Amino acid sequence: MTQKYDAIIIGAAIIGCCIAFELAKKGYKTLNVDKLGAAGHGSTSNSCAVIRLHYSTPDGVAMAREGYFYWLNWEKYLETTDETGMITYINHGCLVTKTEKNKYLKNVMASLDELGVEYEELTPEGMQKKFPFLDTRQYGPPRLPDQPGFGEPTGGRLEGALFIPESGYISDPILSSHNVQVAAEAKGGEFLFHAQVTDIRQKDGRVAGIVLKDGAEIDAPIVINVAGPHSFIINRLAGVESGMNIKTRALRQEVAHAPAPEGVDYEGTAPLISDGDIGCYSRPEVGNHILIGSEDPDCDTLEWIEDPDRYNQNFTGQWKTQVMREAQRIVDLRIPNTMQGVVDLYDCADDWIPIYDRSDLAGFYMAVGTSGNQYKNAPVAGAIMAYLIEQVEAGHDHDQDPLQYSLKYIERQLNLGSFSRLREINRDSSFSVIG
Ligand SMILES: Cc1cc2nc3c(=O)[nH]c(=O)nc-3n(C[C@H](O)[C@H](O)[C@H](O)COP(=O)(O)OP(=O)(O)OC[C@H]3O[C@@H](n4cnc5c(N)ncnc54)[C@H](O)[C@@H]3O)c2cc1C
């Protein structure tokens, strides 16, 4: 391994690997450095890997739609085959309930219409006909099990839901990172594991490389922070945090796994469900299980983590809360005695919209603040970061004149200024995992 590269990428999970692949295709000599032992072993490993389209902003919907086509054309995108196996995309469609908070999905439908994406508007009766295991009564706004009225309908039925057929999930997020690592290596990219970055070096007002825990120094005129929930630490090492209007923090999350009700082929027939009425999202999981995450409703206390290397990795009452909330929607869902699932961290931006940007330090870039919702967008993030880096290094002033990126599948321009570290808080955001 040489000790000089065109670009060092801190992090070798799904987004770090996608950036390496895109830069390597452009001829950059890249090195991904990760303190863990293999690609995708960070927060990506516990991602629910849901591929869905309903975001609260038109750019969010457009990016997710573009990402969908990358997953659909995975082998073509990678231009190679990973001999350890290739991921599968499982398409079950996505059911999104209409609530007052999501404005009955009017904005989402407008964005889907603009992109020509098919969807079906379902009445409560239509929801039940399509998915007989659903209870379509209204329970919202979401509350905690110890709050009065929990589990009791709050009046009538839901307003209805959207069913978006082209949505699904990826079988194995670690394998997807490995697939992209192999693709990046095929283009000359290198990877260094078990190597923790402890400092960012600078020379003459520009980034000059990194220092590793063992004291080794590696040179590069470009360094990219893709460190997930550790992103704020890397930004502090580079001294760029004070120049950011939007910042990132680590947020603890629990995802529960519970067996589907007896007699329901959940794994074979159930859709992804995004349900603001009960404050949960869910998807089928192998073993006829249901995987249940929180949509961060107002009643849940957000648990911000100061040290992403030291946080409670055991389940808490939140686990049971999520299963009990889901049991309002899935008829006969039982609360298991054994708690199964995952505990991990989001790298959360102040407005739950990612930062794909340069920094005030020349040559130092970041793809951070992915807020629990950017796994699906990783291939697009890779492409836009490579474009942004190429343009900024060629002298473009992205801060003053935001770059526009042509999304190749959906043939739409994406204003990269909406992912700027300098933006004002985006008030259109859901301020939740929905983005
Ligand atoms: C529980 C959970 C569920 C999710 N579900 C979904 C979903 O359904 N759909 C969706 O689209 N998104 C989802 N997400 C979000 C998505 O998984 C993330 O946005 C995405 O995986 C982030 O990838 P990444 O490459 O940026 O970072 P990570 O996977 O966090 O990787 C960062 C890497 O940086 C390395 N690193 C950190 N510090 C250093 C250092 N100092 N030196 C060297 N290496 C370092 C880490 O070891 C790690 O490997 C979920 C996230 C979580 C936690």
Image (tube, rainbow, N blue to C red):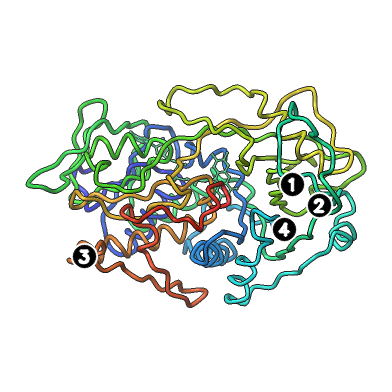
Residue 286 location, quadrant: top right
Q: Which residue is mark 4?
A: 98
What's the distance in space between the residues labelled 4 and 1, CA to CA?
21 Å
Pointer 2 local density, CA inside 10 Å: few below 14, some 14–19, many at least 20: few
Q: Which residue is mark 2?
A: 268
What's the distance in space between the residues labelled 3 and 1, CA to CA?
45 Å
Q: Secondary structure at mark 1?
A: strand
Determine whether label 4 and label 2 are within 8 Å by CB. Answer: no
Q: Nearer the viewer, mark 1 or mark 2?
A: 1
Going by the numbered disc 3, the residue's amino acid type is Asp
Residue occupying the point 38% across, 40% down: 227
* Image x and y of residue 407, in percent: 45, 71
Viewer-closest of 408 and 76: 408
Residue 151 lies left or right of residue 91; in this view the side is: right
Q: Nearer the viewer, mark 3 or mark 1?
A: 3
* Image x and y of residue 201, in percent: 16, 38
Q: Is mark 3 within 8 Å of ligand 1?
A: no
Residue 384 location, quadrant: bottom left
Q: Secondary structure at mark 3?
A: loop
Q: Which residue is mark 3?
A: 397
Viewer-closest of 434 and 153: 153
